Image (cartoon, rainbow, N blue to C red):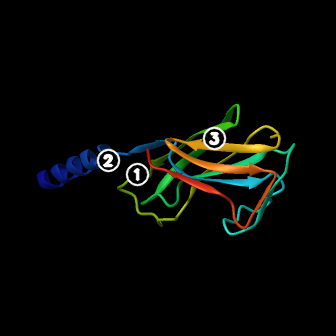
Amino acid sequence: MRSSTLLSLLFVTLVGCSQRDHFVLDDVGRACAFDAESLEFDPRSPQSFVAGAPLTLRVMIEECPLGCNEDFDAWCTVERAGNTLHVTSQGSWTESDPDLLCAAVCTPVIATCMSGPLEEGTYQVELGDEVMTVEVPGDVPKPPCVVSQS
């Protein structure tokens, strides 16, 4: 009887002390520029940037967080200063209770945001410390992308 009580207390202690990590990533990932008409965000699709239209920026903050996760959230914003578009992004998620069994499902953490309408010109798009160039107007065989790990 005493050993079953001790095992019950040990079980409650172990279950009650499970650690759930919360992950937050700022200004990291792969940001790609798509034209305003893009309905699908295929990284191999041609893009046509036109004057007077915004750019759609899609930031893949984390492609496939390991483990069983929940409470995914992602957002991004674009701030313009002259011909520089500064992208700020954040993605977060919480690790599921590590004591529970679950199917590890890959859920990408992706944020989508838009610039305001852009005039003709050459634009520098910044994510973290990394920069890519986008020409407006311009046709490209695939979306330009930049990867930030800062």
Whole-number angstrom distance, CA of label 2 to CA of label 3: 32 Å
Amino acid tagged 3: Cys
Q: Which mark is residue 97?
A: 1
Q: Quadrant of the N terminus?
A: bottom left
Q: Residue furthest top?
A: 81
Q: Which mark is residue 18?
A: 2
Residue 61: x, y in percent?
A: 54, 51
Amino acid tagged 2: Ser
136 left or right of 8 in image = right
Residue depicted at 13% across the width and 54% down the height: 3
Residue depicted at 63% across the width and 40% down the height: 76
94 left or right of 88 in image = left
Q: Nearer the viewer, mark 2 or mark 3?
A: 3
Residue depicted at 85% across the width and 46% down the height: 51
> Which residue was labeled with disc 3?
76
User: Which residue is more in the foreground, 20 or 44?
Assistant: 44
Disc 2 secondary structure class: loop
Disc 1 secondary structure class: loop
Q: Which mark is residue 88?
A: none
56 left or right of 146 in image = right
Q: Nearer the viewer, mark 3 or mark 1?
A: 3
Amino acid tagged 1: Asp
54 left or right of 27 in image = right
Q: Label 3: how many residues lie within 10 Å, few (<14), some (14-19) or many (20+)? A: some
Residue 28: x, y in percent?
A: 50, 46
